[in-house]
Amino acid sequence: MFESGSKTCCLISGASRGLGRSVSVALARQCSDSGTKGYFILISRSGDDLEETRNRIVQICATAEGKA
């Protein structure tokens, strides 16, 4: 994770399942709760499962911004 001012960049491998997905979602919540804009780079072998992780992150961020 790299932080610069109010921006955070997270690179997560294995983000489609298990620990990688849990870390991705937890970091999205942390960014949303702190009001920090998060950029996520998600890496996985499974595209379909990775899309599910992406959708969860988008939902968390949209809810925090009042868009959901």
Image (cartoon, rainbow, N blue to C red):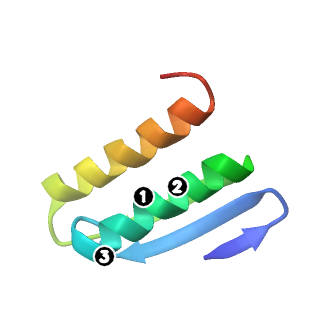
Residue position for label 1:
25
Which label belongs to residue 56? none
Q: Residue 10 lies in what quarter of the image?
A: bottom right
Position of residue 48 in the picture relative to residue 67 (left or right): left
> Is the residue marked by circle 3 packed among few (<14), some (14-19), or many (20+) residues within 10 Å?
few
Give the residue type at disc 3: Leu
The foreground one among 19 and 53 is 19
Q: Residue at x 14, y 65 (%)?
A: 46
Q: Secondary structure at mark 1?
A: helix
> Is the residue marked by circle 2 packed among few (<14), some (14-19), or many (20+) residues within 10 Å?
many
Q: Earlier in the sequence, mark 2 or mark 3?
A: 3
Distance Cα–Cα, label 2 vs label 3 = 14 Å
Distance Cα–Cα, label 3 vs label 1 = 10 Å
Give the residue type at disc 2: Ala
**Marks 2 & 1, CB-CB < 8 Å contact:** yes
Residue position for label 2:
28
Q: Residue at x 42, y 58 (%)?
A: 25
Q: Provide residue 33's location: percent of width, then percent of height.
A: 66, 48
Q: Provide residue 67's location: percent of width, then percent of height.
A: 55, 22
Q: Is residue 5 visible?
A: yes
Q: Residue at x 74, y 58 (%)?
A: 7
Q: Provide residue 68's location: percent of width, then percent of height.
A: 47, 22
Q: Residue 30 lies in what quarter of the image?
A: bottom right
Give the residue type at disc 1: Val
Q: Is residue 36 visible?
A: no
58, above or below 2, in the image: above
Residue position for label 3:
19
The mark tally for this picture is 3
11, above or below 5, in the image: below
